[in-house]
Image (tube, rainbow, N blue to C red):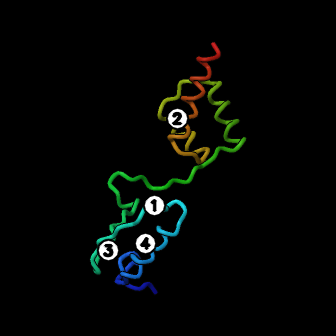
Amino acid sequence: MLKSPVAKAPEASAEGIALLQSTSENSPEGSGRKLVCSLGPGFMPRVVIRHRIKGAKKAQKRIRKNTEQNKILLAEFQKNSQWKKSKIVELQERLGLKMSQIYKWNWDMQRKLVERQ
């Protein structure tokens, strides 16, 4: 069972501030620099949670194409290199890939074809 988030973070307490000061003074990269904190006893540091930021994208899992899917895409490309949306949707249902993946694969192949000529 989850507990309510009422507990203070270690940085917000006096012990946490003292710990931060002592570690920064004793660390090699902190030599010459002293952490100065003028934080009150009820201070709670602001934490930015990435998934709540406006415009942040959800982590996506990449679906890779296997050799069979590549063979089918290549065969369809050799029949006709200019794919309409209906063709992309048909291939999406047939291969189980995303529309964007199929569109991008076709776009890349068209660029390769232009470069070779």
Disc on the earlier residue, 1 or 3: 1
Q: Nearer the viewer, mark 3 or mark 4?
A: 4
Of 13 and 18, which appears nearest the observer? 18
Q: Nearer the viewer, mark 4 or mark 1?
A: 1
Residue position marked by numbered label 3 in the rendering: 44
**In this view, 47 is above or below 76:** below
- As drawn, the label of residue 103 is 2
Disc on the earlier residue, 4 or 1: 4
Q: Is residue 75 left or right of residue 45?
A: right
Q: Nearer the viewer, mark 4 or mark 2?
A: 4
Residue 89: x %, y % from top left: 51, 40
Q: Residues within 10 Å of mark 2 (few under 14, many from 20)?
A: some
Residue 1: x %, y % from top left: 46, 87
Q: Quadrant of the C terminus?
A: top right
**In this view, 64 is above or below 36:** above
Disc 3 marks which amino acid? Answer: Met
Residue position marked by numbered label 4 in the rendering: 21
Disc 4 marks which amino acid? Answer: Gln
Disc 1 marks which amino acid? Answer: Gly
- As drawn, the label of residue 32 is 1
- Give the distance between the C-alpha atoms of the residues marked 2 and 1, in whole angstroms: 56 Å
- Residue lying at 35% horizontally and 67% vertically, measured from the top left: 36
Disc on the earlier residue, 4 or 2: 4
- As drawn, the label of residue 93 is none
Find out whether the residues at labels 3 and 4 contact each other: C-beta distance under 8 Å: no
Find out whether the residues at labels 2 and 3 contact each other: C-beta distance under 8 Å: no
**The residue tagged with tag 3: helix, strand or loop?**
loop
In the orientation shown, which residue stands out farthest toward the right? 67
- Give the distance between the C-alpha atoms of the residues marked 1 and 3, in whole angstroms: 27 Å
